[in-house]
Amino acid sequence: MAKNKTTATESSVVDFVNAIDDEVKRNDAFELIKIMQNISGFEAKMWGPSIIGFGSYHYKYASGHEGDAPLAGFSPRKAAISLYVYLSDKKREELLSKLGKHKSAKACIYIKKLSDVDLEIVKEMIKISLELTLKLYPPQQK
């Protein structure tokens, strides 16, 4: 079984963000860190070389593949900021219609800069994503 490439690391989130050349993207990344920390209650942590994640959950698919992933996260990539949120199809459609300027794929929402979108909608997406993910993958009792 293939091992996940994107795992939590001990790399510095602040160093990673400070290395972003684009000042707007760098400032937006720090703003998203504040937003996601406030909503999730978790500190920012690097996942792989370029994803900033908050909290984690363990998943196991019917295929047997399993691993850990951040409960909420984003990546300030060169072309756009990738937001990683999980929403039901209906809620996703509804919220994306109110979000503002963006592009989307199945698992990601791409935004150029935070000023292009409604931050209240971003916050709502993060909250819903956390609730849905924790419902699907409740924390394991040790």
Image (tube, rainbow, N blue to C red):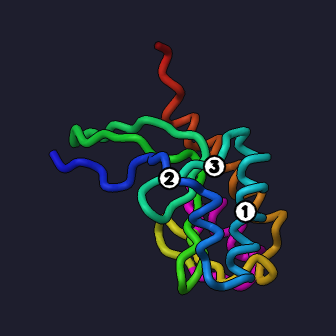
User: Tag 2's secondary structure?
Assistant: loop
**Residue 44 — which label?**
3
Residue 32, percent from left and from top? 73, 62
| Disc 3 from disc 2: Cα separation | 11 Å
**Residue 11 — which label?**
2
Report the residue marked by disc 1.
32
Residue at 49% from the left image edge and 37% from the top image edge? 57
**Residue 104 — which label?**
none
Closer-to-camera residue (81/98): 81
- As shown in the figure, which amino acid type bears the numbered disc 1? Leu
Residue 42, percent from left and from top? 67, 40
Instruction: Say which of marks 3 and 1 sits in front.
Output: 3
Residue at 52% from the left image edge and 39% from the top image edge? 56
Q: Quadrant of residue 104?
A: bottom right
Instruction: Say which of marks 3 and 2 sits in front.
Output: 2
Crowding at dot 1, Cα within 10 Å, few <14 / some 14-19 / many 20+, comes out as: many
State the extent of the magenta-drawn residues as a range: 83-103
- As shown in the figure, which amino acid type bears the numbered disc 3? Ala
Residue 10, percent from left and from top? 48, 46
Is 84 part of what is drawn in magenta?
A: yes
Q: Is residue 34 above or below residue 66?
A: below
| Disc 2 from disc 1: Cα separation | 18 Å
- As shown in the figure, which amino acid type bears the numbered disc 2? Ser
User: Tag 1's secondary structure?
Assistant: helix
User: Tag 3's secondary structure?
Assistant: strand
Q: Earlier in the sequence, mark 3 or mark 2?
A: 2
Q: Is residue 85 visible?
A: no
Residue at 77% from the left image edge and 83% from the top image edge? 116
Q: Is residue 136 above or below residue 84?
A: above
| Disc 3 from disc 1: Cα separation | 10 Å
Query: How many numbered marks does the figure carry?
Result: 3
Closer-to-camera residue (73/52): 52
